[in-house]
Amino acid sequence: MKIVKLIALTTFLALTSTQSLAGDDDWKTIAEKKVSYKSETDTVNPITSSHYSHIKVKCTHGTVNLKKIKVVMNNGEEKVFDNLGVLTKGMSSRSLNLPDKNDAKLDKIKLEYESVGSTALSMAGVTEKAEVEILAKKAKKED
């Protein structure tokens, strides 16, 4: 009986985890950045000029403290997202809704963040500088 429950539980987890991964196909990497150990603000220009509805930041190495993200659209509209928290390798921020007035496109992203750790700890092999990817989700066209 315990084996049947174990098999049922494993099957359930396998099925639900693949369903949650299926939604990740909509996200496209539009920029990558290496984060220094001191607090900094970087401006990132997306590599494509498509119309996006959402963005999120994914940590691919190390640990990063995301303080603030400011998005600037090509029509001059801006939106600021605060208190995004600490991300470790493999984690991503919540989905951030972009302004979409007059079909504006994403022009640039200003990231205020810092890598958690220090140069000394990095040399000792304890921490790594954080690397992040900025992912975007294309806006669905309404006919």
Image (tube, rainbow, N blue to C red):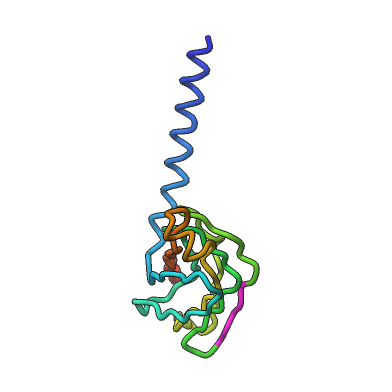
Q: Is residue 80 left or right of residue 136?
A: right
Say which residue appears at 57% left-offset and 67% top-offset.
66
Left or right side of 15 for 41: right
Residue 90 in the image: above or below residue 112: above
Number of on-image labels: 0
Q: Main secondary structure of the magenta part?
A: strand
Q: Is residue 21 above or below residue 14?
A: below
Question: Could one spot residue 76 in this view of the protein?
Answer: yes
- State the image coordinates of residue 63 (x, y, percent, origin top left): 51, 59
Q: Position of residue 6 (x, y in %)?
A: 50, 19
- Measured as percent of width and height from the top left, residue 59 is found at 46, 60
Residue 81 figure quarter: bottom right
- The magenta region covers 77-81
Picture residue at 51% right of the left edge, 66% below the top: 115
- Front position in the image: 103 or 27: 27
Q: Is residue 68 magenta?
A: no
Judge from the rendering whether residue 46 lies leftward or rightward of residue 72; answer left or right: left
- Quarter placement of the C terminus: bottom left
Query: Which residue is most to the bottom?
Result: 76
Q: Which is nearer the eye, 50 or 121?
A: 121
Q: Which quadrant of the structure image shows residue 60?
A: bottom left
Q: Nearer the viewer, residue 139 or 88?
A: 88
